[in-house]
Image (cartoon, coloured by chain):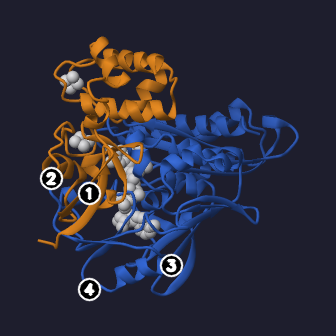
């Protein structure tokens, strides 16, 4: 399968990337890892006239800790997330989720920024970013802005990103007590359902401390990554004993509309699995207290 | 048709340059421009791993990378593994353990294994199997492939 012809440019700076996207009247797209865009181009579902490769912009890739926050550059590849010492120490959920994406070849190429911009309904990192209450830094022709992950994902392959806008960085607070649990679709390894749970647990008592805050998000269940508010409400103020976790996870399907229903899993099956994997993510997050 | 652009890629240690259309996939660059037909196309949809090569030492599906993206990088294909007549330990492993039947998936399997063993020289059986998550074989049932890689790890 041969994609339609296009013109290829490599940007060396963020400004150059924005200029190269902006200067053409035709359809131009950023190219990161290419692991969603190239398959679409080969099927000619996408036929951009120009690709602006952002993988050679210094400073757009990397993982850092600054002012009590963790920053992840948009072109950071999954394999770097998986192996990052910083993430393993202070945000193990990101390393864990990255390690569950696709297969090694995909993890060697795909990037966090590409995954969030593309927003596949079954992609893993969107749910993790929503659970961690991450912010996305975005630059574009109108300047810089900051969006909360929860507001960024709006619907089926639909995100709050205008034409010509570039995601540069994701920022979030460190949180050890967060985990991701995923049911793999056996052929593609995309999530049939995946749940990310980020918990605040009262210090000093390990997993027996009272849960003071909880953000739980799901992917694969519906059109886009979203919070499981019923589950969250049932955890806050409680000690996370097994019955509490089970009762909370039972509420996973609450308020989720347009549940995916396809040959890989019926809506009923996905709702059930969302409960099972919510419970697993919560248990694993609590065990990190 | 878009303009051809010059690309320079270090393939199996040798600097190779050509003028290519940006839409040329790396796998076609290797097979058609350079005549390195050891890298196979199985599915052409990023699933099967038959087209796996190393880009800067890490496995990648060359049907899902444009040649222009690899410009300035080092690419290793199955042709680049053996040293003269001496097979690479992974090739030797496939030979000794009957790691192939029709052989279609084999170059991709071997390159995926090369990437794995570079990162993890002493993998468990489970780690070998997850290292092959991106590669499909329609013949062997995988067990002999896993044995071949385990043998290569011991010999390596
Ligand atoms: C076999 C296979 C299995 C996979 N399995 C999984 C899986 O299990 N889980 C999962 O989550 N994903 C999976 N994926 C998808 C993979 O994670 C992609 O890499 C990801 O969706 C896109 O990231 P990319 O860097 O490859 O982006 P690209 O494909 O380069 O770009 C995707 C889109 O995002 C835009 N874009 C990229 N970067 C930016 C940026 N910084 N700012 C603005 N726009 C940008 C591009 O213009 C394009 O429209 C799989 C893919 C394949 C081929
Ligand atoms: S041919 Fe590239 S993955 Fe199948
Ligand atoms: S040996 Fe035939 S596909 Fe693997």
| Residue A49 pos. (x, y %) | 22, 74
Pointer 1 residue Cβ closer than 8 Å to ligand 2: no
Q: Disc 1 vs disc 2: which is toward the camera?
A: 2
**Mark 1, residue position:** B67
Q: Could you say which is closer to the camera, residue A278 or residue A32?
A: A32
Q: Are marks 1 and 4 on the same chain?
A: no
Q: Does A286 appear above or below B85?
A: below
Image marks 1 and 2: residues in contact by CB distance under 8 Å: yes
CA gap between label 3 and label 2 equals 39 Å
What chain does mark 1 sit on? B
The residue under the point 34% across, 25% down is B88
Pointer 3 residue Cβ closer than 8 Å to ligand 1: no
What chain does mark 4 sit on? A
Pointer 2 residue Cβ closer than 8 Å to ligand 2: no
**Mark 3, residue position:** A139
- Residue A131 sits in which quadrant? bottom right
What chain does mark 3 sit on? A
CA gap between label 4 and label 2 equals 33 Å
Quadrant of the displayed image that contains ligand 3: top left
Q: Disc 4 vs disc 2: which is toward the camera?
A: 2
């Amino acid at each position: 399968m041969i994609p339609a012809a296009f013109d290829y440019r490599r940007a060396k700076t963020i400004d150059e990337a924005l200029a190269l996207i902006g200067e053409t009247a035709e359809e131009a797209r950023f190219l990161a890892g290419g692991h969603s865009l190239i398959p679409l181009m080969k099927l000619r579902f996408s036929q951009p006239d120009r690709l602006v490769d952002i993988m050679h912009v210094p400073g757009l890739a990397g993982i850092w800790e600054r002012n009590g926050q963790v920053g992840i550059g948009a072109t950071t590849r999954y394999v770097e997330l998986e192996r990052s010492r910083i993430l393993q120490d202070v945000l193990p959920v990101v390393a864990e989720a990255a390690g569950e994406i696709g297969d090694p070849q995909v993890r060697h190429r795909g990037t966090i920024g590409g995954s969030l911009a593309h927003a596949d309904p079954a992609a893993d990192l969107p749910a993790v970013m929503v659970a961690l209450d991450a912010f996305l830094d975005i630059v574009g022709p109108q300047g810089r802005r900051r969006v909360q992950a929860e507001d960024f994902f709006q619907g089926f392959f639909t995100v709050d990103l205008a034409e010509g806008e570039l995601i540069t960085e994701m920022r979030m607070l460190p949180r050890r007590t967060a985990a991701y649990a995923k049911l793999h679709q056996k052929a593609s390894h995309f999530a049939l359902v995946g749940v990310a749970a980020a918990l605040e647990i009262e210090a000093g008592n390990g997993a027996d401390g009272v849960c003071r805050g909880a953000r739980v998000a799901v992917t694969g269940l519906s059109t886009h990554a979203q919070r499981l508010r019923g589950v969250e409400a049932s955890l806050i103020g409680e000690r996370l004993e097994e019955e509490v976790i089970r009762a909370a996870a039972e509420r996973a399907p609450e308020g989720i509309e347009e549940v995916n229903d396809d040959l890989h899993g019926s809506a009923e099956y996905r709702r059930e699995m969302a409960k099972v994997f919510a419970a697993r993510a919560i248990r694993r997050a609590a065990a990190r207290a | 048709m878009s303009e051809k652009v010059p690309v320079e890629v270090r393939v199996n240690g040798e600097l190779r340059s050509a003028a290519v259309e940006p839409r040329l996939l790396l796998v076609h660059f290797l097979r058609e421009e350079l005549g390195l037909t050891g890298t196979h196309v199985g599915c052409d949809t990023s699933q099967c791993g038959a087209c796996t090569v190393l880009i800067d030492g890490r496995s990648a599906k060359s049907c899902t990378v444009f040649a222009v993206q690899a410009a300035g990088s080092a690419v290793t294909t199955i042709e680049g593994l053996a040293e003269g007549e001496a097979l690479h330990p992974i090739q030797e492993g496939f030979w000794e353990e009957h790691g192939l039947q029709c052989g279609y998936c084999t170059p991709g399997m071997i390159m995926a294994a090369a990437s794995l063993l570079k990162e993890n020289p002493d993998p468990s059986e489970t780690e070998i199997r997850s290292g092959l998550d991106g590669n499909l074989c329609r013949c062997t049932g995988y067990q002999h492939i896993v044995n071949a890689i385990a043998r290569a790890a011991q010999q390596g």
